[in-house]
Image (cartoon, rainbow, N blue to C red):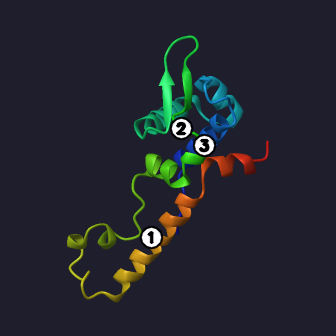
Amino acid sequence: MFKISRKTEYAIRGMIYLAKQPRDQFVMIKEITKATKTSPVFLVKIFQALSNANLVVSSRGSFGGFKLSRKPEHITLRDILEATEGPLIMNLCVLDNRSCGFSNTCSAHSAWKRLRDSMNGMLEDVTLKEIASDSRE
């Protein structure tokens, strides 16, 4: 079963909120948490991960906060998922053939690779702009 964590859910909510704001405007974390009904302490940690992944830019001070690092159409769902969850792995043998002694003979190996490639492709096709425009607010 593939299930996203609460961390990723909050990251997506926060990114949607930022996508709807003027691009040059920094938004305070307090405003984001209020609008997205998320935990301020948890969201700060999440936005640090998003900043480390170069998806958001932060600024300190009275006019500080966060804003998207690039246009929403250039941020994918895969970008957000990998910033919060790490690389998407269907099976360890697909990530590293040395982790499985059966990679060369296992008939499931190619199926895992196709599934991973398919999922990555679908996640890359969904942009933050698309998600933000579909959201019901």
Instruction: Tell me the quarter of the picture where residue 26 sits.
Output: top right
* Relative vertical location of residue 107 with respect to residue 68 in this rendering, above or below: below
- Is the residue under label 1 in contact with that under label 2 (CB below 8 Å)? no
Spatial CA distance of label 1 from label 3 is: 23 Å
Whole-percent x, y for residue 58 in the image: 49, 25
Residue type (three-letter) at the residue carrying disc 2? Arg
Badge number at residue 61:
none
Label 2 – label 3 distance at C-alpha: 6 Å
Which amino acid type is shown beneath numbered disc 1? Asp
Q: Secondary structure at mark 2?
A: loop
Residue 102 lies left or right of residue 89; in this view the side is left
Would you say 30 lies left or right of 53 here?
Answer: right
| Image position, residue 85 (x, y; %) | 44, 51
Labelled disc at residue 117: 1
Q: Identify the secondary structure beneath mark 1.
A: helix
Q: Is residue 37 visible?
A: no
Number of residues whose C-alpha sits closer than 10 Å to that of mark 2, classed few (under 14), some (14–19) or many (20 or more): some
Q: In the rendered image, which residue does mark 3 sit on?
A: 72
